Image (cartoon, coloured by chain):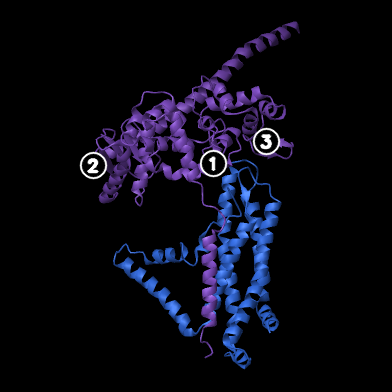
């Protein structure tokens, strides 16, 4: 049964999974080629700036992959009013587990290509003194971020409209409060506080805001 | 015909001094041009200064500070001056007379012009504090004396120069120079040499103390990074540079670097966008960070001692400001620089566990959803 669900999810998402995997493979190559043009040692600082700038692409890519795989797992169920799932002789939790596992398998190619891209790009680059490559660490961070993004979007997509509405309402309240505080001339910064709360330890999205550096000191 | 040859010979002999005079005339023309530029610069500065007296200006006075302003929000200027004083007081002391009658003219956009008792600073209405901070660094830099300033660079550090230590860490770690790498490893004497400290009679002596032959060759090799593909060699490389790099003639390397040292700090010609100088192991920002550490160690009055010290050598001034030996200042600087290392690229185990925790939580939430019930 897992194989059938995996095959169906692969058919729904292969159109963009392959391009995303190619992008994941190519980012490290451009990161190093664009950033490093010679062996003059003041280039090294420029290289680090370029790597940091390109590195911002990784959390965005992880979030995009998580969003696409997480939501596409449920999109056809929603369209078919869950008839297919209801006729299966399985409890809901088991069906969810199958869908979740199939999604995890589909995340693997993107994770592997990011790792291979990072590995090959650094393998064929002569780095200046004092700078080292961290392809394994980068791939590990990317794997965790993708996994988390996928789980979050999978959970939201699997829920009811009421649940999605509740999430949107919370976000809306935060934004409106910030706007009102701004109009009232208050120094209150709800958005920043909320962002800090979810991205700084022990916030759930901490892994997204770390150092996405393929090469570093 | 012999007469013709004789006339040609006489003409040739007459042409020699004329040619020499022509060379001298060209040199003089350069000097005159340079002086004209200076006159034009100071004319412009004087005009700028005069405009202050003619314009409808306000003066904001806070303690010893006086800021002349012609359009900026007075309250904002006052806040900015107060903030600047707060930054200085911890190191200068509240009773300082350093700020007495120091005027900051905040008028329109333009580069800083430091005159006898006034700084003309470009107006940045949305960040007056930063502008005054910048102007103060330039002003007090000029007060430290030419010799100290040639070591320190154009700016005297204020306390928040400590915040620049992560950048200094990066510079030190990335340096390919042997002396800087030894400093990074904890050799305090090498740190002193890396920061161009030590008494040296001539630039040649200093260059031999700071660098080994390989480093000197490396530095000369960095001077002209453009490669001429048609000629198959570096563009504009002089014979001396080729002898230094290809024939490993150390005398040529020293002569070239000493020439650069003597010719001043023409930084941009060699490393655009940086304050790296080929004759110094580390840049001026690094020197400034050492001075900032000395000021921190010195506490109250450190700034006054740094500026008013009569010592010529930078290390003596720093010792005076810090009230500690230069070794102690260097050790503290080294420790603080290492402490400013950026966080590791690796995912912290706790971060990985938190992520996995949320993955499991969201998976449970999805499994427990009542979507089809």
Cα separation, mark 2 vs mark 1, equals 40 Å
Residue B61 badge: 2
Between discs 3 and 1, the one toward the N terminus: 1
**Residue occupied by mark 3:** B235
Residue B171 badge: 1
Q: Is residue B219 above or below residue A144?
A: above
Between discs 2 and 3, the one toward the N terminus: 2
Residue B158, horizontal then vertical, whole percent: 38, 40
Q: In front here: A210 or B259?
A: A210
| Secondary element at image label 3 | loop
| Secondary element at image label 2 | strand
Q: Is any part of residue B89 visible from this angle?
A: yes
Q: Residue at image x 65%, y 66%? A: A111
Q: In front here: B327 or A77?
A: B327
Q: Quadrant of residue B157?
A: top left
Q: Are marks 3 and 1 on the same chain?
A: yes
Cα separation, mark 3 vs mark 1, equals 27 Å
Q: Quadrant of residue A214?
A: bottom right
């Amino acid at each position: 049964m897992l194989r059938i669900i995996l095959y169906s999810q692969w058919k729904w998402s292969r159109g963009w999974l392959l391009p995303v995997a190619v992008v994941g493979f190519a980012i490290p190559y451009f990161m190093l080629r664009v950033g490093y043009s010679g062996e003059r040692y003041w280039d090294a600082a420029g290289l680090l700036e370029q790597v940091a700038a390109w590195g911002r692409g990784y959390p965005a890519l992880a979030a995009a992959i998580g969003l696409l795989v997480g939501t596409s797992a449920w999109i056809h169920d929603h369209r078919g009013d869950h008839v297919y799932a209801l006729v299966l002789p399985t409890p809901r939790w088991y069906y969810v587990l199958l869908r979740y596992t199939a999604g995890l398998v589909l995340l693997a190619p993107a994770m592997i290509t990011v790792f291979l891209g990072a590995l090959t790009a650094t393998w064929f680059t002569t780095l200046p003194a004092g700078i080292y490559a961290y392809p394994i660490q980068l791939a590990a961070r990317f794997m965790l971020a993708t996994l988390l993004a996928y789980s979050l979007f999978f959970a939201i997509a699997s829920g009811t409209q009421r649940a999605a509405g509740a999430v949107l309402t919370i976000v809306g309240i935060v934004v409106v409060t910030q706007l009102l505080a701004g109009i009232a001339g208050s120094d209150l910064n709800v958005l920043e506080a909320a962002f800090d709360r979810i991205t700084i330890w022990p916030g759930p999205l901490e892994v997204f805001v770390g150092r996405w550096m393929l090469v570093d000191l | 015909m012999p007469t013709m040859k004789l006339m040609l010979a006489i003409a040739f002999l007459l042409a020699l001094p004329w040619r020499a005079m022509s060379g001298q005339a060209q040199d003089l023309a350069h000097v005159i041009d340079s002086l004209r530029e200076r006159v034009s610069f100071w004319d412009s500065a004087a005009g700028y200064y005069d405009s202050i007296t003619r314009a409808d200006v306000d003066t904001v006075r806070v303690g010893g500070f006086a800021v002349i302003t012609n359009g900026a929000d007075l309250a904002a200027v006052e806040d900015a001056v107060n903030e600047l004083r707060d930054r200085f007081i911890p190191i200068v002391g509240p009773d300082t007379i350093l700020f007495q009658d120091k005027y900051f003219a905040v008028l329109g956009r333009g580069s800083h012009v430091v005159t006898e008792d006034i700084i003309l600073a470009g107006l940045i209405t949305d960040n007056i504090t930063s502008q005054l901070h910048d102007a103060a660094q330039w002003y007090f830099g000029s007060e430290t004396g030419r010799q100290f300033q040639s070591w320190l660079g154009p700016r005297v550090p204020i306390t928040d120069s400590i915040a620049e230590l992560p950048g200094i860490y990066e510079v030190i770690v990335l340096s390919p120079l042997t002396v800087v790498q030894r400093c990074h490893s904890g050799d305090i004497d090498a740190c002193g040499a890396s920061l161009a400290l030590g008494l040296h009679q001539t630039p040649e002596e200093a260059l031999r103390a700071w660098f080994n032959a390989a480093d000197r060759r490396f530095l000369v090799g960095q001077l002209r990074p453009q490669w001429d593909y048609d000629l198959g060699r570096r563009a504009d490389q002089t014979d001396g540079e080729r002898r230094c790099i290809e024939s490993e003639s150390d005398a040529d390397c020293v002569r070239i670097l000493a020439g650069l040292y003597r010719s001043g700090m023409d930084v941009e010609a060699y490393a655009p966008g940086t304050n790296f100088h080929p004759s110094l192991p580390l840049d001026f920002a690094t020197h400034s960070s050492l001075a900032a550490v000395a000021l921190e160690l010195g506490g109250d009055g450190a700034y006054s001692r740094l500026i008013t010290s009569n010592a010529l050598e930078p290390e003596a001034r720093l010792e005076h400001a810090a009230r500690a030996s230069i070794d102690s200042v260097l050790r503290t600087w080294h420790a603080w620089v290492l402490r400013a290392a950026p966080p590791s690229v690796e995912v912290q185990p706790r971060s990985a566990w938190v992520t996995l925790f949320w993955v499991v939580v969201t998976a449970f939430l999805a499994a427990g959803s009542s979507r089809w019930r």
